Amino acid sequence: MVRLKYCGNRSAEDVQVAIASGADYLGFIFAESKRKVSPSEVQQWLAPHELGAKRLVGVFVNAPAEQIAAVAAQLPLHVIQCHGRETPAELAAVKEAVPLSVWKAIHHGDGALDAMKRYAGIADGYVVDSRVAGAWGGTGVAFDWAAVPRYLEEAARQGVPCFIAGGVTPDNIERLLVYRPDGIDISSGIETDGRKDPVKMKRIEEKMKHCSK
């Protein structure tokens, strides 16, 4: 079963459609980004809803462990995603400060697989994203998915899940599903004019359902 994460929710409307969707994880970005949100906003948007089985992911970039812990104390997060240049020691400090799963983003490129190996025994999961100058994620740019099996193999060796992010859309998701990643992380690919689009979400979910048969 390939899990699905809808990331970069940034309004009450985004949250409403994401909660009504088939996603397993909803992501919120607490780092400099056009999709940056505050803990108080997220609190307000979540208040009218029951989460059910959905899990919440807080995305941070090079944030100190204390800052992450402060956000986690305000929200019912299930996962912390460190999406910057956090070292294994810094990731371990986050795990010590916050009693939640901690995922590490790895940016595809030379040395990415070796970097992933350095977090073995510390990271509880990985998100492999495109490397784009001047941006940490949410760019809508895909990397060469022929590399996906190597990341999945390393994550399996570590006994943790590996999500694939970057440029996934309703039009290309079938090409990614061929590799059977543990999860797919989508942000811009489910947006129209900067808002989460339930029609695009439905197309994504239908294609995932079809591929799982």
Image: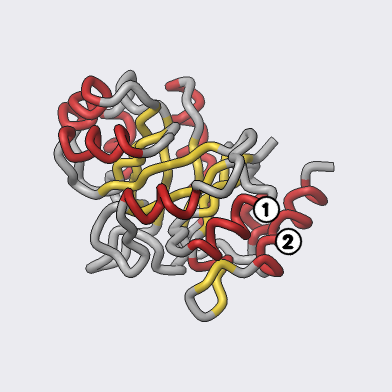
From the viewer's perspective, is 116 left or right of 64? right
Residue 45: x %, y % from top left: 47, 54
> The residue tagged with tag 1: helix, strand or loop?
loop
Disc 1: which residue = 21
> From mark 2 to mark 1, how far is it between C-alphas?
8 Å
Q: Closer to the camera, 173 or 110?
A: 173
From the viewer's perspective, is 38 left or right of 8? left
Please name the amino acid that badge 1 sits on: Ser
From the viewer's perspective, is 132 left or right of 23? left
Quadrant location of the C terminus in the rendered image:
top right
When the figure is inspected, residue 97 is found, relative to residue 41, above or below; the finding is: above
Q: Are marks 2 and 1 in contact (CB under 8 Å)?
A: yes
When the figure is inspected, residue 182 is found, relative to residue 89, above or below; the finding is: below
Of labels 2 and 1, the one closer to you: 1
The disc, 2 or 1, on the residue closer to the chain's N-terminal end is 1
Residue 53: x %, y % from top left: 63, 33
For residue 206, say whether it is visible. yes
Residue 31: x %, y % from top left: 26, 55
Disc 2: which residue = 202
